[in-house]
Image (spheres, grey):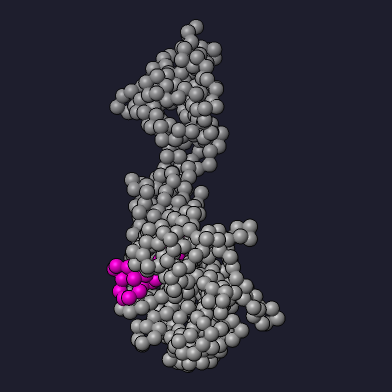
């Protein structure tokens, strides 16, 4: 099993996910040079090739210098960020204050400040116009229930999905000079404005809202305490699906905000940020910059080496780390197993000397990006007759007790087996006991049965292993042990014909018979389930009487 989990901590949410490193240089966009009028409320089409904005204190406005008109400009050079000479959006401007407050995703619907339907077009509200055959149509008022604007200062932001409307105005329950409200469109009808919480609104003013395309980040300007100038841009992150639950707002920082007025924040489809500021002049101009993200941290498993034998410690995991910001901190969850070392000068790491098990590596770079790798080092594949190599388990002649002396420590072997079963709780084994060839077949079968049961009883009754995980089997004298010749790799079977040639050498003759009086362990499977396993037979705990 190899699992790769990649996570980043987000300092500054924008239209795409990632972690902000820094901002590019803040620049005045080129259309500022065409006029000394105040420029605000930038809206860039989803194609990125056209920008709409508002000009105030421009003599060419329909209502004169103190009027406010909507203008537009086309991108003339994307490489050098040049915009064409702005043009007045004559069809949608009148002799009063006009403004753009939203664009649909397909750019064919524009949302406008003012209702355009009241006496002398002074009715406060919001309208929209459709573009048909390349021409904007007469604005149509949008009805927002219970929206009563009494003050002279108000604004809107229509999300490109055309279902979420943010409003800033002084309403009946406003905390300060202007607060933010929200209206949602359902079944083609707009809801009454709902007051955003006190986390967002303060005793001061909150204006010029903007909602990210993903609807999870709200931007606005405020002159609340703690800002850099007369108005700063803040952001807040949505805390749930509920559009009324937002995090505590955070200031975008001094790179974006100046010591003067900063507002009308907008992010286009290419993640370029635009806003209005009078940081360098009497009137506000439009500025832009781009977020620069940290290189994404990633890691992957290069190689996994499983252990070569059951219970072995020669497994290893090799993995590589890329991207992010160095230095890396690497944490291994299985700290008691293996030694982690860096491979030469590359960002490749190797954990060696590992037992079987699950290993996880948490890699964290110097800016907090995190990657988690999970890998599994396995035991050798289990076969039905796979034996576990243990120290000797031997029995005295005609007995089922254990040989325990300076050279043979049978109980130590059983204790080692106990620890192995404890470590691998799904392991099921067979205890197979043997006799030497002396005595009748029937007697030797019973004797071997009892020897297997003696091992079984020790593990179950004294060590507490689940009885259903062990099957004791007596093999009698039918399976003599095979050993290697001392001077070759040839195997010798310790049968009667081989052992009897040493009858005159009593010590060797008895030692060879002793080798046959043994108990061996083999793995049956690794699928033991205590919930579904059948009960162990009671007969496993009862010794049989020798004839």
Q: Is residue 302 visible?
A: no
- Judge whether 265 appears above or below 467 on screen: below
Q: Which residue is painted at 50% across and 24% down in the image?
A: 468
Q: Quadrant of residue 511?
A: top left
In the rendered image, residue 276, in percent from the top left (x then y), is placed at: 42, 80
Query: Residue 273, position in %: x, y?
Result: 45, 76
The vertical placement of 258 against 64, above or below, is above
Residue 57, percent from left and from top: 44, 88
Q: Is residue 461 above or below residue 524?
A: above
Left or right of 216: which side holds 281?
left
Can I make out residue 228 in this image?
yes
Specify whether 316 is left or right of 227.
Answer: right
Give the residue furthest to the right: 133
Foreground: 343 or 546?
Answer: 343
Residue nearest the viewer, comparing 170 with 395: 170
* Image vertical order of residue 6 relative to residue 378, above or below: below
- At x 53% / y 70%, what residue is drawn? 125
Query: Could you say which is closer to the camera, residue 267 or residue 72?
Result: 72
Residue in the image at 47% along x and 12% along y: 542
* Magenta stretch holds residue 207: no
Residue 439 lies, in percent from the top left, at 49, 13
Residue plotted at (41% across, 14% down): 399
Q: Which residues are magenta?
A: 218-239
Give the image quarter of residue 114.
bottom right
- Determine if the magenta segment contains residue 222: yes
Count of marks overlaid on the render = 0
Instruction: List the single residue furthest toward the front.
Output: 119
């Amino acid at each position: 099993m190899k699992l790769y989990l990649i996570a980043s901590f987000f300092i500054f949410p924008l239209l795409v996910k990632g972690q902000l490193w820094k901002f590019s240089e803040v620049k005045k966009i080129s259309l500022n040079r065409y006029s000394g009028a105040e420029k605000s409320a930038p809206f860039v089409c989803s194609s990125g090739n056209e920008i709409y904005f508002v000009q105030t204190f421009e003599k060419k406005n329909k209502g004169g210098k103190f009027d406010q008109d909507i203008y537009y400009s086309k991108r003339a050079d994307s490489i050098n960020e040049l915009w064409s000479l702005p043009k007045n959006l004559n069809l949608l401007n009148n002799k009063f204050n006009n403004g753009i407050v939203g664009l649909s995703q397909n750019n064919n619907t524009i949302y406008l400040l003012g209702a355009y339907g009241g006496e002398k077009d002074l009715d406060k509200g919001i309208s929209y116009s459709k573009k048909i055959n390349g021409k904007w149509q007469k604005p149509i008022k949008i009805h927002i229930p219970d929206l009563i604007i009494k003050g002279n200062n108000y604004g809107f932001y229509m999300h490109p999905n055309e279902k979420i409307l943010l409003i800033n105005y002084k309403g009946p329950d406003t905390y300060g000079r202007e607060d933010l409200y929200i209206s949602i469109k359902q079944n083609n009808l707009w809801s009454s404005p709902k007051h955003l919480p006190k986390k967002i609104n303060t005793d001061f003013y909150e204006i010029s809202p903007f909602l990210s395309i993903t609807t999870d980040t709200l931007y606005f300007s405020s002159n609340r305490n703690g800002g850099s100038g007369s108005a700063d841009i803040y952001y807040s992150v949505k805390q749930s699906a509920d559009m009324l639950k937002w995090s505590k707002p955070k200031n975008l920082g001094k790179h974006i905000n100046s010591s003067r007025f900063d507002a009308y924040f907008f992010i286009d489809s290419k993640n370029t940020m635009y806003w209005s500021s009078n940081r360098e002049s009497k009137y506000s101009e439009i500025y832009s910059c781009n977020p620069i993200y940290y290189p994404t941290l990633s890691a992957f498993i290069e190689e996994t080496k499983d252990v070569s034998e059951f219970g072995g410690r020669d497994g290893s995991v090799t993995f590589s780390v890329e991207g992010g910001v160095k230095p890396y901190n690497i944490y291994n969850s299985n700290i008691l197993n293996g030694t982690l070392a860096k491979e030469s000068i590359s960002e490749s790491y190797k954990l060696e000397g590992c037992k079987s098990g699950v290993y996880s590596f948490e890699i964290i770079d110097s800016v907090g990006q995190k990657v988690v790798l999970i890998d599994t080092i396995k035991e050798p594949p289990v076969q039905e007759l796979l034996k576990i190599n243990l120290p000797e388990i031997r029995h005295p002649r005609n007995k089922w007790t254990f040989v325990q002396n300076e050279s043979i420590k049978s109980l130590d072997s059983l204790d080692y087996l106990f620890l192995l079963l404890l470590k691998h709780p799904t392991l099921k084994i067979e205890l197979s006991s043997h006799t030497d060839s002396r005595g009748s077949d029937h007697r030797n079968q019973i004797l071997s049965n009892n020897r297997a049961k003696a091992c079984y009883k020790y593990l179950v009754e004294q060590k507490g292993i689940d009885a259903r995980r062990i099957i004791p089997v007596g093999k009698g004298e039918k399976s003599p042990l095979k050993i290697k010749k001392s001077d070759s790799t040839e195997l010798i079977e310790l049968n009667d014909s081989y052992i009897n040639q040493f009858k005159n050498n009593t010590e060797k003759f008895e030692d060879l018979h002793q080798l046959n009086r043994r108990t061996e362990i083999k793995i049956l499977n690794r699928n033991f389930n205590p919930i579904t396993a059948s009960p162990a037979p009671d007969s496993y705990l009862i010794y049989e009487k020798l004839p």
